[in-house]
Image (cartoon, rainbow, N blue to C red):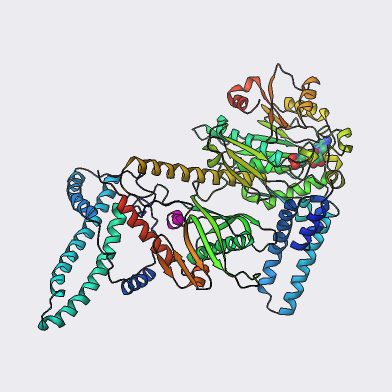
Amino acid sequence: MRILPAVKILARRESPYLPLLLPTLRDIDSARRELRWIAEHFHDRAADGLAVETNSQQKIKLKSSLYRKIWKACFLRGYKGVPLQYILGSQPFGDSLDIICRPGVLIPRWETEEWGVKIARGIRQYHPFFNAEENLSSQIIFNILDLCTGTGCIALLFAEQLKTNKNVLITGIDISQKAFTVARDNRKANDHVLGTNLSVLFKVGDIFTRDLSSMSNIDIIVSNPPYVSEENYYSWTHTERSVRNYEPRLALIGGVEFYKRIFEIATTTNAKAVVCEISDGQQYRDILDANCVDSSLWCSGSMYDEAGVVRTIVSWRRDAEDEWGWLQNLIS
Amino acid sequence: MYSWCGRSILRQLLPAARSSYRVPLAPRFATKTLCRYYSTDGESSNYILNSELRAKAQALKIEYKQLSESLVNGYDDAKMRQHAKLESLINYADEYEKLSAEVNDLQELSTATDEDSLQLRDDALLEMEEIKQQMASFRTKIERLLIPSHPFAHYPCIMEFRPGIGGSEAAIFTKDLLEMYQNYCQAKKWKYSILEYNPSGDGSGILEGILVIEEPGSYERLRFEGGVHRVQRIPDTETKGRMHTSTTAIVVMPQLDAGDENSNESERSFAPGEVRVDIMRARGAGGQHVNTTDSAVRLTHIPTGIVVAIQDARSQHKNKAKAYMILRGRLAEKEYNEKVAEERKARTSQVTSTDRSDKLRTYNYPQNRVTDHRCGFTMHDLSGCMDGSALDTLLDKVQEWATNEEVKNLQFQ
Ligand SMILES: C[S@@+](CC[C@H](N)C(=O)[O-])C[C@H]1O[C@@H](n2cnc3c(N)ncnc32)[C@H](O)[C@@H]1O
């Protein structure tokens, strides 16, 4: 897609930074919006310094360094195609989370946020554990397992949505040491979602090899495993260049084998429900065709995202209808 | 006693006894303008309480007595509050009647024409002026208690700003107005935030702005600001020194789930299928394949066709929550206005109409003045108005006018 010369001229007239953004963002509205986010981000960080600095010489220095930073950010974003979240260092998530994003760890997507909020709010509203009248004895814990947790965004989202006086334990596992570090930092940066009765733990581990049998009473497994096929990964109509260039391969390339393994883990950990993000409707059928889900034990369905794409596979044990039957209302 | 529903849109909201909120009245300004009013307009009658209201106040004495008796038999929270409200009403009404009798007495003296009574006459006139001011204050108090409150009176509010006619000048004025209300909030120490800010091409103005004011009751204070505002000034870019006229449209609506955009209460208040959600479609297959920042959300309310688009936040989830909040406010406003209009149509009484396309105020820069066309009030302090410090004077006048309209339209059962 060519950028119209008129758009370029317009952008230059408006702000010297705008044309920098155009190669990646293409249309002037998106460029304008991102420029504002970038400018606000660096302004906010420099605001304290600018406010206390009285020496005008120093003030000018601070200002010019601020403009340099904005210029550099626009350059990286527009000319290099670096994801905005890596430049600004974070992505807002859920109602109140600010998820730290660093190169080497996948950026949380809006689709993930959307289904995560839906499922978590459903649990809060319909699962008997959160609605039982009597105060459940302190022994009973609601256990959530987040496989392939990455930044830890799903684990923390569930913490945010399920923070009550009930006991909740959320465990996030990821193979990548980098992801583990970011997840831990995210827990610290968002510790307002933790509580005396709610903990979030992160562990390093390969879900294919790690022995998880010590966890035996999981209520729900949530996961956004790598699901981009090798073929789609290299097809530019499927996968954005910026994704390929800047986000980790390890977090992206995967397929049915992950779902097979997730349902195996569900069996060994006694999980009552499983919700996983998937690539599309085709992948949903592939998962069922590969017999990853034993339909004599599980009810399953798929859920669309707001863009109209099949985005999640939702399953619950047939013998846990009382607790999880409400999921039926979410699937199509 | 009264039901609020649909007597008139022009409604003085009373600081309901049940809420801790009080309509912020600035007495300093009130008296100042009052004086000016008197000096320019000797015929002022703003101390006179509408005769029907006067009769009503007297009639309520019976209800008060009955209530007092029933309270002897047992305590009831609601009755107690009603009792307290009636008590102050009756006190005010009695005070008012007393003063009114005094004025009548003085009236006789003041019309005396013989030489001997001239000094007496001047004294009487002075005295009357003072009493009338007292009466005016009682009148306001009584009206506040008698006129039913607006259903959303105690809510925080949302203000939307959009340029009307006048091209880039209109965009600049829209930005000025947004800033004026921000300044006003700051002066009042009200919490506010900018929910949407869409700068115009050259950045000098805005194409859209949404201001969210968290102060409970701000809806009541600002709801008459909704409508078309007009500016007359000579733009910086104008070489021939010609004056331009441009406009901004403001919509004021209640913020129904107060202060908490995180609660999805707004979203829950819609039936499934009632709202169509459109999002910016990312290129490609979505999910892990794409990491663009497109977060714009557009909601279409299918039954009414109302569209709300929000793109300000980096998070789609937040944009959606905000859009639902605005949609709900707009619908509440629309429903209420329609109900009022319908009930008005059903009555034959002559009512001043507030056509929304009418300009309600003019900001004239060369003459340093602001004129509100509804109450006919002119203030020669444009800068004070724009920096928020003198806006209260204007709002008081508008509110006074609205109360008058309200009384005119009030029907008694
Ligand atoms: C698509 S990312 C999802 C991250 C995060 N849950 C989210 O939704 O943003 C997949 C994650 O799975 C991790 N991963 C890949 N293979 C894994 C394995 N065998 N065991 C555990 N984690 C793995 C990657 O490191 C990556 O962080």
The C terminus of chain B lies in which quarter of the figure?
Answer: top left
- Number of marks in the image? 0
Is residue A262 in sight in this rendering?
A: yes
- Looking at the rendering, the stretch of residues picked out in magenta corresponds to B214-224
Q: Please indicate whether residue B77 sits to the left or right of residue A327 in the image.
A: left
Pick whichever, B251 or A155, lies toward us: B251
Please say if B211 is above or below B366: above
- Pick whichever, B25 or B147, lies toward us: B147
On the image, the x and y values in percent for residue A133 come to: 49, 32
Left or right position of B290 against A315: right
Q: Position of residue B124 (x, y in %)?
A: 17, 76
Q: Mostly what secondary structure, the magenta segment?
A: helix
Q: Residue at x 71, y 66 (%)?
A: A46
Q: Is residue B65 left or right of residue A219?
A: left
- Above or below, B360 relative to B307: below
Residue A243 belongs to the span the image colors magenta: no
Which is nearer the eye, A332 or B330?
Answer: B330
Ligand 1 occupies quarter: top right
Instruction: Give the x, y percent position of residue A165.
Output: 55, 41
